Amino acid sequence: MPVEELDDKVILTNPNDSSSKVTILKYGATIISWENKGEEKLWLSKAAKLDGSKPVRGGIPLVFPIFGKQKDSNHPTSKLPQHGFARNNTWEFLGQTNESPIIVQFGLGPENLSEETRQLWPFDFTLILTISLDDNKLNTTIEVENSGKQEFEFNWLFHTYYKVEDITDVLVSNLIDQNCFDQLIGESYIEKAPAISFHEEFDRIYKNINESKIIQVIDKGKVLYNLKRNNLPDSVVWNPWIKKSEGMGDFEPKTGYHNMVCVEPGHVNSMVLLPPGEKWIGEQEISIGGEIKVQSNIY
Ligand code: BG6
């Protein structure tokens, strides 16, 4: 069956290749697994809560309407928890819209939120998440609609946890000369590394990356993932390394930081202002393999 709906999750199977599957938890509309030709591509913590008691540690959690914690105490998002409420509320499964590639949609609106969350962010909105699974490709598109009478501001981010064999062999490319904000030291600067490598905790927001740039995750010279973005100008790159992983109760095994890297496309450096009746769309497309593509002026 290409689309199987269970109580708490939906499983998609590529009609052209039954060894390619995606599992989406209704809680947070979190993609918790993407198997491509039988190989898992997303990292999921062994201690991730999948019972709706806590955002999922791993897969692709959805961040809306605030990335991190709002620093301005007068902003309407200031009372919301870290990374907002999209990742810790249960979305509605709206059904399948295409057979091949297989496409499904999930929706979230105020009616799906707890009364408590409604009080924290009282706007009318509709979120539609579209997930498309194709051969060697996974596409996630978010549409945010302001269905109320007041404008609102939001961040969006796909918090994608990629699975890798060993982080010390991994490079993330095509971010050279990009302005970035280093969350660990609280400073902005221009990235000068031709490719990012990892040997300690890493937490940077790369800002306003040209849409033509394809961010690649490369392992020992082999392209693992190509990340294309549409209307998602920023990208967070994160690895918690040793100490931070130890501090996260739902991060297991504690050596798991070796096997993951987050490359998270979003709109987080600034907020999107959405007037009543308007829609905004952002998209990430992940494809597997192919050639290294150098998009910089270093050579
Ligand atoms: C990343 C942030 O996007 O998410 C990090 O840049 C943060 O600062 C990480 O630690 C995980 O956040 P959380 O809320 O899932 O623990």
Image (cartoon, grey):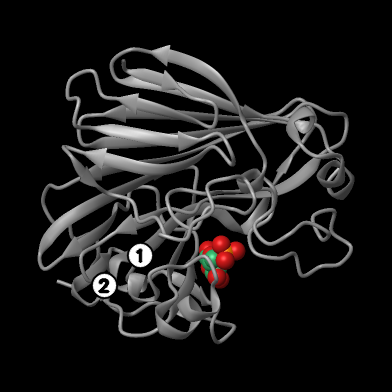
Q: Is residue 83 left or right of residue 19?
A: right
Q: Where, by quadrant of the figure, is residue 164 drawn?
A: bottom left
Residue lying at 31% horizontally and 84% vertically, measured from the top left: 199
The picture places residue 231, in percent across and down from the top left corner, at 49, 42
Dividing the image into four quarters, tell me where ligand 1 lies.
bottom right
Nearer-the-camera pick, 153 or 26? 26
Residue picked out by circle 1:
261
At x 85%, y 41%, the residue is: 118
Give how far across and how far down residue 134 sits, in percent. Answer: 26, 28
On residue 176, the disc is none
**Dot 1 and dot 2 residues touching (CB under 8 Å):** yes
At a point 45% along the width and 75% down the height, the residue shown is 240
Q: Measured from the top left, where is residue 72 in percent x and y?
A: 81, 67
Q: Does 197 appear above or below 263?
A: below
Which element is circle 2 on? helix
Name the amino acid type tagged 1.
Answer: Val
Which residue, given by chain and number where applicable, does mark 2 sit on? Answer: 167
Quarter of the view holding residue 172 = bottom left
The image quadrant where one finds the N terminus is: top left
Give the answer, above or below, for where 11 lies relative to 68.
above
Q: Name the image quarter holding residue 276.
A: top right
User: In this image, 130 relative to 198: left or right?
Assistant: right
Q: In 3D space, how far apart are the residues under numbered discs 1 and 2 (Cα atoms)?
A: 7 Å
- Residue type at tag 2: Ile
